Amino acid sequence: MKKQKQLVKLAGHILSAIHRMKEIKLEDTQARLEIVRNQNDEFTRDAHRLNIAVKKGFSYASAKIVRKISRDLNDFNYHICRFRDIITPDKCRMPALSEIVSELTAAQQEFDQFSFDLKAKTISITTKSIDLEGISLGNFEIRLFIDEFDKLYKERPYRVIALEPNPAGGDCNVTHPHVSHERLCEGDGHTAITRALEQARLSDFFCMVIAVLENYNPDSPYIPLSEWDGTSCYDCGCNITSEESCYCENCEHDFCENCSSYCQICGTTLCLGCVSECQGCKEYVCGDCMGTCNECGSRFCKDCLTDGLCVSCQQEREDNDDEECEQQPQDSTVHAGGMGETAVYAGHDRQ
């Protein structure tokens, strides 16, 4: 008896949420109509610009305007579809409180793990473990937030929560090919799911969400199943498998083959940001195998340094030593007439 009273109270919350949702729907219809009108005005301006460009023979400008129209057309189609969805007349009347109670009772009987929280105003069911193409994704909780019904036309009032997450290697927030950050990409089921929530057909709502989770659409996944076991390159962000990843022993991150290298001296695997290019042999070397020339201050690998000098500075020092040996100074001349006398000849007789 107590549980039945709780269901009636929960049904009351749902009915109030649907009334609020109807009011919000009118406001959202107005906002979406304004978007469509503004987009249409932009097409009118583009048509005027294109007419002038064509008449004046500005082929480059004309092509640029056409490309802009093409891009805007994709946005326009999206807004038209959403506007059509929201203005479609409701085919069902507002449900009565008793009908919502019946829906809750039916959902309770249909789903083994059905639960609700009166304080938080949530309704939840738990799916069975979901396997897609041999990959086990575990079971999910579908949690419906009654107080978020008024957000139905802007964002979805429910979350899809992985209870035994096996996320994609490239993004821990993708727990299912069609779930990212607990948000479901509904695909073709978007309109049907919206209608079910508008009419408080809770069993239908949960069944439709489960159907999306149990089927894989290879045309629109956040991350394809073929790349599920991969990881993300820390540098470029591309998805890579565990076999393709290269672990940098310096910064301790995973990188793809294009963003990694290794020290040519000690063989340590490193990312491109943790290796340096020797200015002598032009090879990639780790920091431990690099040194600084004592003369020029440039960075070289240890193999290119001898006694702290690079090849160029060492050669320059040897050349300077040889030149000093060849230019020994001869400051005095010894004459037969006496020791220590210095003879200076200026090319003419001394006065």
Image (tube, grey):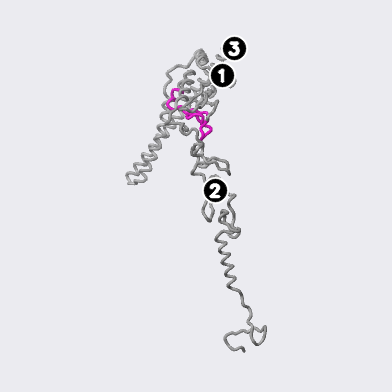
Tell me how far mark 1 sits from mark 3, CA to CA.
Answer: 14 Å
Question: In the image, which disc is placed on residue 239?
Answer: none
Residue position for label 2: 263
Q: Residue furthest top?
A: 1
Residue position for label 1: 116
Q: Is residue 236 above or below residue 93?
A: below
> Can you give x and y, in whole percent of width and height, for residue 92 in the image?
44, 17
Sort mark 2 into few (<14), some (14-19) or many (20+) by Cα contacts within 10 Å.
Answer: many
- Quarter of the image for the C terminus: give it: bottom right
Which residue does the image show at 56% across and 40% down from the upper left? Answer: 253
Query: How many numbered tags mark residues here?
Result: 3
User: Residue flagged by tag 3: what amino acid is it?
Assistant: Lys
Front of the two marks 2 and 3: 2
Question: Which portion, as a residue range, is magenta?
Answer: 167-193
> Can you give x and y, in whole percent of width and height, for residue 144 in the image?
53, 22
> Can you give x and y, in whole percent of width and height, for residue 272 in the image?
53, 46
- 11 on left or right of 51: right
Q: Tag 3, which secondary structure? A: helix
Residue position for label 3: 2
Q: Is residue 238 above or below residue 294?
A: above
Which residue does the image show at 42% across and 26% down from the upper left? Answer: 188
- Evaluate if marks 2 and 3 touch, with contact meaning CB atoms under 8 Å apart: no
User: Residue flagged by tag 1: what amino acid is it?
Assistant: Phe
- Which of the pair 258/67 is nearer the observer? 258
> Can you give x and y, in whole percent of width and height, for residue 27 in the image?
48, 26
Sort mark 1 into few (<14), some (14-19) or many (20+) by Cα contacts within 10 Å.
Answer: some
**Mark nearer the N terminus (1 vs 3):** 3
Sort mark 3 into few (<14), some (14-19) or many (20+) by Cα contacts within 10 Å.
Answer: few
Which residue does the image show at 58% across and 52% down from the upper left? Answer: 290
